[in-house]
Image (cartoon, rainbow, N blue to C red):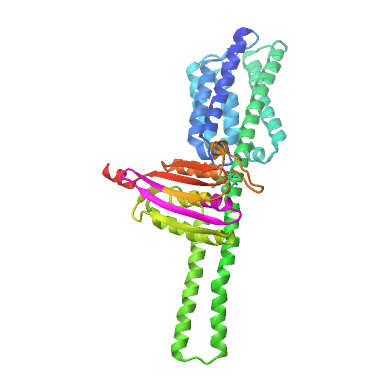
Amino acid sequence: MEAMMTGMINNIFFIIFPIIIYQMLATAGQRNFFVSHRVTMTVLFSISIILCMLFPYQFLTDQYIFDLRQVPMIVGALYGGPLVSAVLFLVSSGGRFLIGGDGMYIAIFNQFVIAAGVPFLRPLYMRLKRFGKIVLVFCISIASLLFNMLAGAYFFGDPIHDIIGIWVMLIINQGTIIVLTALMIEHMQRQEYLYNSLLKHEKMETVSHFAAAVSHELRNPLQSIKGFIQLMKEYDYSREKQVEFHSLILKEINAAEDLIDDYLVYAKPTYGQLEPITVSTEVHHVLKIMAPYANGKDVKMQIGDMDETAEILVDRQKFQQALVNIIRNGVESMPDGGTLAIAAKSSPAKVWIEVTDEGVGMTKEEVQRLGEPYFSNKIKGTGLGMMVTYSIVSQMNGQIMVDSQKGKGTEFTLEFPNIATFEKK
Ligand code: ADP
Ligand code: MG
């Protein structure tokens, strides 16, 4: 009994370790367990199939040696689809072939039926709710064990009434484990999905803030264009005057276009390529996008000492997003208006970008909690802005330093490796 428990627990461990590793790999952007790590998952599931076969356990009597390889096979086929299923079949049948013995062909045939049949149930499975999914995996597991039992009885003349008790226990045993495995995967997918939709929500919220500010700001150029056109209609201006009006109108149209372009850059999705950028150009750019928002809150944005030549290696849009998040927090920390200053400095090794506000500031504890998901002191805050910012900056080999005093203000410093250090290498 003890040996059986140990063996079974080993098998269970072999099954859940890929799932645990998967959870460590999974970061953002995927909704299906297998889709974005197909290769990794196939390898991990293959390993768990092999381990299950290498360390089977005796089930109830000495004659019955059992392992849980069907669990990764069925789960893999359901979540991964036909191709993954085919690979898992090759692995498990190859393994079974090496083990050899009486039941080899039956076992391999059984594995073939699972591998070929289960992917057909996949579309149905994906449509089912959680309870339906559990029922379906349980049924698949029963069907395949019954198949083995009947084949055993038919080919080897195992007396059915002797072994039926054992098979019932096996069905419950494997069924429970496969149900738990499916539940675990579903639970993780759900969490991942929620997490991703929250991140999206955070970005959407920023974008919609801008949309409001930008469309407000667009009114100015449109108003003056309208004004000029009305003037030209009402009076008979000289050719010279008209040309002057035309160029003024064109200027306003260009201003409007720039505003829209700037806004679009921020709203577009990012792809994560690193490229060399000039810090001051990007800072000016971000300040321009943020200007309508800051104006609306009575905040003056000021450029301090600016190293005009400093360059760093980053993903342009993510860098902008990080700056936008920090500046936005700075603006929001000054409900009665104030000044937000930005500066950039560099040494041969590092580049620093400093964002200083005169806002409400934070206590030491609050500073420590920055970047923690959902930490927010705002009524409509998401508490995701800084989390995203920290993760973006560290992805780009940067660091964030925070110096804050309650009631006085906050200084955020972003530190990046100077591009000069890359070029030397
Ligand atoms: P949100 O802005 O949605 O609240 P963030 O992750 O952007 O979420 O910020 C988390 C919290 O950190 C804010 O609610 C605020 O309390 C604090 N914080 C961030 N930046 C500043 C700042 N410049 N001044 C004061 N408090 C800040
Ligand atoms: Mg924020």
Residue nearest the viewer, comparing 10 with 201: 201
Decide if residue 305 is on the left or right side of residue 42.
Answer: left
Residue at the (33%, 54%) spot, across then down: 309
Residue at the (52%, 64%) spot, across then down: 260
Please identify the quarter of the rendering in which residue 4 is found.
top right
With respect to residue 299, does 250 lie above or below? below
- Is 338 within the magenta? yes
- Is 361 within the magenta? no
**Residue 318 in sight in this render:** no
| Ligand 1 rendered quadrant | top right
- Image quadrant occupied by the C terminus: top left
Residue at the (67%, 47%) spot, across then down: 379
Q: Give the residues drawn in magenta, as a range.
A: 327-352
Please identify the quarter of the rendering in which residue 7 is found.
top right
Residue sitting at the far front: 408
Residue nearest the viewer, comparing 202 with 133: 202
Residue at the (57%, 60%) spot, across then down: 298
| Image coords of residue 259 (percent x, y) | 50, 65
| Number of numbered discs | 0
With respect to residue 347, does 179 lie above or below? above
| Image coords of residue 88 (percent x, y) | 52, 29
**Residue 8 in sight in this render:** yes
| Image coords of residue 242 (percent x, y) | 47, 87
Residue sitting at the far left: 424
- Image quadrant occupied by the N terminus: top right
Residue nearest the viewer, comparing 405 with 243: 405
| Image coords of residue 254 (percent x, y) | 47, 71
